[in-house]
Amino acid sequence: MRNGLSRRLVMCAALGLCLVWRPGAAPAQTNLSAEPASLFGSYLAGRLARGHHDLAKASRYYGRALERDPDNTALLTQAFQTEILRGNWDRAGKLADLLFLKEPNDRLVRMFLGLRAFKSGNFAAADSQLEAAAFSPIGELTAALARAWIKVADSNFDTAFARLDKMKDADWARFYITYHRALIADVAGDTRKARGSYDRLVREGMRTLRVVMAYAQHAAHHGDLKLAKNVLERLNRRSPSPHPLVVSLLQDLKGGKKPDILIATANDGLAEVFYGLGHTLIGEGNVEVGAIYLQLALYLKPRFPLALVALGNVYEVQKRYADANDVYQLIPAASPLHFSVQISRAFNLNHINRVEEAKTLLEDLHKQRPREVKVLDALGFIMRGRKRYAEAAVYYSKIISQLGRVEPKHWSYFYSRGVCYERLKLWPKAEADLVKAVELSPEQPAVLNYLGYSWVDQKRNLTKAMAYISKAVQLRPDDGYIVDSLGWAHYRLGNFKDAVKHL
């Protein structure tokens, strides 16, 4: 049977049919509810379901295919990868054991078996498996970092540092090597080495959230509160809005609370390896591999808030909104990330047409933090998107009423409320808000277009209206909606020759 399946796969490849197996490329009209009766049908259905990111169905189809051909390496590989992506560790473990007997050089199997051995305390077996998992640049880096943390578990810090040093000549890996050297030095109690590595990261401009948090917690843990606060506040100044983790740590420091170091155990260090690399892989477009790394981080540290948030973000991009919310529910209530994640949950509920649940959730959050603008903004956005303009306008009014000093960055609240008023046919109020939005931020194409076209439609302020729309087109020439507005504006004014150029 396996040979028959292989021949069919070759035929599919020759005909170009394998293109539909690429994740995200399966056609939307494919009927995944049909139940295939054959081995090949089950295999194809599994691949299609996985391409649609429906991992539960993919798992079921692969399971049925394996019932018919349990020794098929290709099936085992696909099924194993699917269970890793699902975070279904019992099933993944059974498939890994079977696959290892047939394909001992499968790198992902080796990686998983290494982590499983680590979790059981068999550090020698973990080290051996992860050494064998090294392949390609990213695989070599993963193995080097992971094997260093295995030596930390054995309290063999010299060997841990030596393993990191083997990668020191790879410029592309320098950030990860330096970062994990700092973390391991912290665990070892080598304050000087840790401080030197953190200083180097900051000096070279590698001020990621995780580096800043680790450096600040290191400094505060060893009594240098001034340095800790400076590092955190510098990150805040560079960010559009303060990160909840940074805000929470600053509050702890101001309250006299002494934080632990960021990574205090080898298990957490190993989870940090897979979280950090997974996050980077996703950012570079390697979403499926990155998601596997995030799941492996969660295998080691199931309630790892940042890994859960990153995985939820992947699901949102894949339009798996219910799955994203299931992941977000796992974030502990005590985590500083919990509140902001509830806002994401509300947006996801709206995406799956559970609007009233989204509204109730956000209203509850508003009661907890009445002055949290992001909650009111989310309520306004969802209601406006649902054409419930009167409700949306109330939320935007609440935001505006508590702004205090109005600044250019607040333009969007006036614009959004202005749109609501215009849709409610309250033009004087709408015009006042839209004009205010332009005054606050004159280079916003959406505002210029909306106000300009509204004036043209009413045949008022025509010179200024056309100037606004023309400027919007200059600012965003590839936006078909705005370019179309310019064409319609010319048409409304009887400039048919100019209208044709833009319509």
Image (spheres, rainbow, N blue to C red):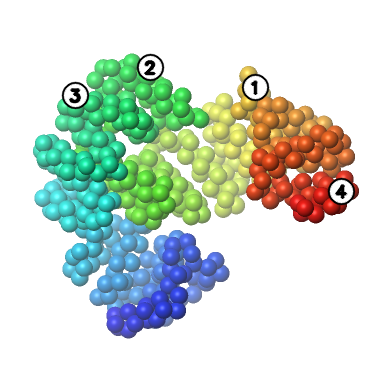
* Amino acid at circle 3: Arg
Q: For marks 4 and 3, give the CA distance.
A: 74 Å
Residue under label 3, please give it. 192
Q: Position of residue 467 (x, y in %)?
A: 78, 36
The numbered mark, 4 or 3, whose residue comes first in the sequence reads: 3
Q: In this view, does 472 lie to the left or right of 126?
A: right
Q: Residue 260 carries which label?
A: none
Q: Mark 1 points at which residue?
A: 406
- If you read the primary sequence from the N terminus, does the residue marked by circle 1 or circle 2 appear first? 2
Query: Going from the N terminus, do you reach mark 1 or mark 3 first?
Result: 3
Q: What's the distance in space between the residues labelled 4 and 1, CA to CA?
A: 39 Å
**Which amino acid, by three-letter code, is at mark 1?**
Val
User: Can the viewer see residue 6 in this picture?
Assistant: yes
* Residues at discs 4 and 2 in contact (Cβ within 8 Å): no
Q: For the residue carrying disc 3, how many other residues have a C-alpha within 10 Å: few (<14), some (14-19), or many (20+)?
A: few
If you read the primary sequence from the N terminus, does the residue marked by circle 4 or circle 2 appear first? 2
What residue sits 39% from the left and 53% below the top? 286
| Residue designated by label 2 | 254
The CA distance from mark 1 to mark 3 is: 47 Å
Q: Which amino acid does label 2 sit on?
A: Lys
Please state which of the two labelled residues, at mark 3 or mark 2, is closer to the viewer: 3
> The residue tagged with tag 3: helix, strand or loop?
helix
Q: Describe the element under mark 1 as helix, strand or loop.
A: loop
Q: Are marks 4 and 3 in contact (CB under 8 Å)?
A: no
Task: Give the residue pinned by disc 4.
Answer: 495
Select label 4 or label 1 by which is in front: 4
